[in-house]
Amino acid sequence: MRALILALSILAIIDSAHFAKAGLSGAPRETSAPADTAIAAGEATQETEQQIGFTKAKRRDVQRRLTRLGFDTKINGKFDESTRAAIARWQEETGYPTTGFLNAGQHKALTDAAKEAVKSDRKDRRRAGGRARYSRGVGGPIGAIGGAVRGVGRGVGSAVGGIFRR
């Protein structure tokens, strides 16, 4: 009976080893080519971007979505060189003409891809066991203070240490 339990435990550990790799990744996600080739053929320019009417909040949203997909850029609401380079890398990876500007179709494709990435991340976290669990033992900041002071001895040290005990 003990051997069976041991064998099942080992199999469970081996099976769950891939969960250790779960978490945020800095690598760009695999993305497919644009579904509509007409959208890809229409080159994005500064004028097409102006037609979308990006406010500062919408530009921040684009920057967050690019970062979510692995194309890191500053989230400052300005389409500066860093953001233009991130847009161009995203366009290159997804098969769009590499201009550094967005048109309406590309903006929608970027938004949809980022939404899918969020869904995928949530599924991965659920499979990996949900939220991280933190120990509340002596290793925490309050526990460390109480533990360090407790060793001082009687008197003030033990009084202060007693405040931090649980």
Image: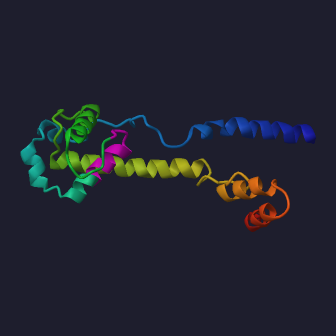
Q: Along the horizontal axis of the image, is 1 left or right of 114?
A: right
Q: Quadrant of residue 11?
A: top right
Image quarter of residue 20: top right
Residue 110 lies within the magenta run? no
Is the residue 46 above or below the residue 131 in the image? above
Magenta region includes residue 69? yes
| Residue 136 seen in this snapshot | no
Horizontally, is 47 left or right of 165 in the view? left
Name the residue: 20% across, 57% down. Answer: 56
76 vs 15, nearest the viewer: 76
Percent coordinates x, y for residue 39 in the rendering: 16, 42
Q: What is the number of callouts on the image?
A: 0
Q: The magenta stretch spans which residues?
A: 61-72
Give residue 21's position: percent from left, percent from top.
57, 37
Write the residue at 6% across / 46% down: 47
Name the residue nearer the viewer: 98 or 134.
134
